Image (spheres, grey):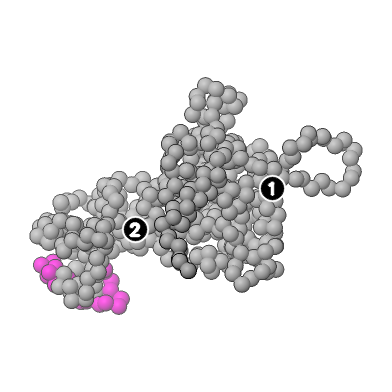
Amino acid sequence: MALHCGRACRQYLLHLAHDNVDFRLPVRTVNLQFTQTFSPFWQLNGLSEDDIRSVMSRTVCGKSAFELWGHGTTIDELRTSLLEYPAENMAPYLQQNSTYKINVYTFNKTLVFKDRIEKIDALDFLPFKGTVNLKDPEHIFCLLEDYGSDPNDIPEEPFHMYFGRWIADGQRELIRSYSVKKRHFIGNTSMDAGLSFIMANHAKVKADDLVYDPFVGTGSLLVACSRFGAYVCGTDIDYNTIHGIGKASRKNQKWRGPDENIRANLRQYGTESLYVDVMVSDASKTVWRKNAQFDAIVTDPPYGIRESTRRTGSHKDIIKPPEDFSGESHVPVSMAYHLSDIFADLLNFAAHHLVLGGRLVYWLPIYRPEYCEEMVPLHPCLTLTNNCEQTLSSHTSRRLITMEKIKEPEDSDRLAHLADPRFTPYQGHNSFREKYFCGLTKKNGKDSKATPKNKD
């Protein structure tokens, strides 16, 4: 189990939060080689300590990272593993003039203080020469124990034990400090802070990037991307949301205040200087020049549940006004914007307006009983890199789709669906709203049948 190698090829342990489990693998800024399991403890190989610190400086899925000194399924295996670990790798952190402390972390089991102390005392075979300092130690070590994931069947002894030197914590604090509950300007569909940062990481957003959200809403995704130093902009068809007017989404507040807008949100987090602008625009009718290039497009299109899917247009015959027309400005009417068209337009826009290597990250709503890989929209200029599921109910979920631009558009791409059926828009998305409410109706029907009526 021991690794006899230099600093660049030591083994590391990543302790992951046990939420958004399906999003763990893609959230990275360096290439990782590891043993993937559903456990919250991942062993990482082939990385340097700088790589680990780079990952932990971005991830909101990881709690902490450690240099792994030993591991095993029993205390005896752990002891053997630790004794085999190269002494020269331990020595810099066990000096007599240093201070340290040892923490004990257990997954799926709570230990009383006495049991924790006993587990620490059992590590007395390690050659610690420094002084214990619980408040401000130079070095922190941790014993981590995995008791499985079933809270109804917790074993007496752990399935696996790990011991290592703490290196860095992840960015879980961002979930609390950027919580929408504390946000200056919010709406009915403001994206959760944790998921917003996950999307920014999927898009590999970095300093000085230009990031665009075509369904910007209240700007939650712009806030997350600006946190990593990107310049941000967006559009939305909803005039009231863009201008921060109309009814408020907060409880006990009827109308939005005079300074409730997306710019104010970035100002709240100290990133107003990275705010380019937002404007009212229809995603189905692009207003951008052909040479407009974005480093990333990160968005959450409307599904027709809490926000309607609308675009400008009319079912009537469209008559183009004469060139010398000088009447009052025309206020366009709106019409339904089918989900299949939303995704086709979004992918086509990304193909034309992303830089090579730029990423498109968006949510795709799914009716779970009918889901298959063919439902994920494709484009000849984009390659699918990640597809992660967030379950919403027993019958619905949404999948976080990440795509990367691999080539510039060509005229032949317009007919790609004729040569390859994979590029044909999937029309089944258009019935998601009906299936969503149908599932709720069936569930409520079962609940009402199961609940006995009171007799008078």
Is 280 placed left or right of 454 in the picture?
Answer: right
Density class for disc 2 (Cα within 10 Å; few <14, some 14-19, many ≥20) is some
236 lies above or below 379: below
Expressed as whole percent of the image width and height from the top left, the position of residue 437 reads 53, 49
The mark nearer the N terminus, 1 or 2, is 2
Is 8 placed left or right of 76 in the picture?
Answer: right
Residue at figure coordinates x 43%, y 36% from the top left:
373
154 lies above or below 438: below
Mark 2 residue element = loop
**Which residues are drawn in magenta?**
120-142
Residue at figure coordinates x 49%, y 60% from the top left:
193
* Relative depth, front residue between 378 and 297: 378
Hey, what amino acid is under mark 2? Answer: His
**1 vs 2, front mark:** 2
Any magenta on residue 125? Answer: yes
Task: Say the numbered circle drawn on residue 58.
Answer: none
Residue at figure coordinates x 61%, y 55% from the top left:
217
Quadrant assignment, res 146: bottom left
**Label 1: which residue?**
281
Task: Say the numbered circle drawn on residue 18.
Answer: 2
